[in-house]
Image: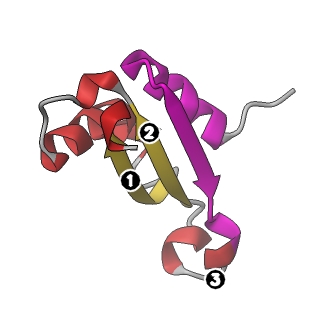
Amino acid sequence: MTATLADEIRARLAVLAPEAIDIHDDSAAHAGHAGAAAGGGHFDVLIVSEQFTGLNSLARHRKVYALLGDLMPHRIHALSLKALTPDEL
């Protein structure tokens, strides 16, 4: 079985010990878009982790981007991110 980019995103984010993670590949909805034409995917990610406790939204996003940054902008063209603590669900 071949791993997808969503599988790779999930594997990389595992270090944050997420209690929940939902990755939705919206790439097909952006067919013909300049970034999509170059092969970059569009993803919506919801991640819930205790490791976000005490961090503001910017710091949470930075933690995620530190893990995925090398995938952007070529493999991931657009990333919509929602990073929550378990208490914020």
In which image quadrant can residue 49 be found? top left
Which of pointers 2 and 3 lies earlier in the amino acid sequence?
3
Distance in Å between CA atoms under marks 2 and 3: 28 Å
Q: Is residue 20 magenta?
A: yes
Report the residue that reaches farthest toward the right. Answer: 1
User: Image quadrant for the N terminus?
Assistant: top right
Residue type, mark 2 in image:
Ile
Report the residue that reaches farthest toward the bottom. Answer: 32
Q: Which mark is residue 32?
A: 3
Which of pointers 1 and 2 lies earlier in the amino acid sequence?
2
What are the residue bounds of the magenta stretch? 5-28
Q: Note whether 47 is above or below 39 in the view shown.
A: above
Distance in Å between CA atoms under marks 1 and 3: 23 Å
* Place of residue 77 in the rendered image (x, y in percent of width and height, measured from the top left): 46, 61
* Place of residue 50 in the rendered image (x, y in percent of width and height, measured from the top left): 31, 23
Q: Which residue is mark 2?
A: 47
* Place of residue 66 in the rendered image (x, y in percent of width and height, measured from the top left): 27, 33
Q: Residue at x 56, y 31 (%)?
A: 10
Q: Which residue is mark 1?
A: 81
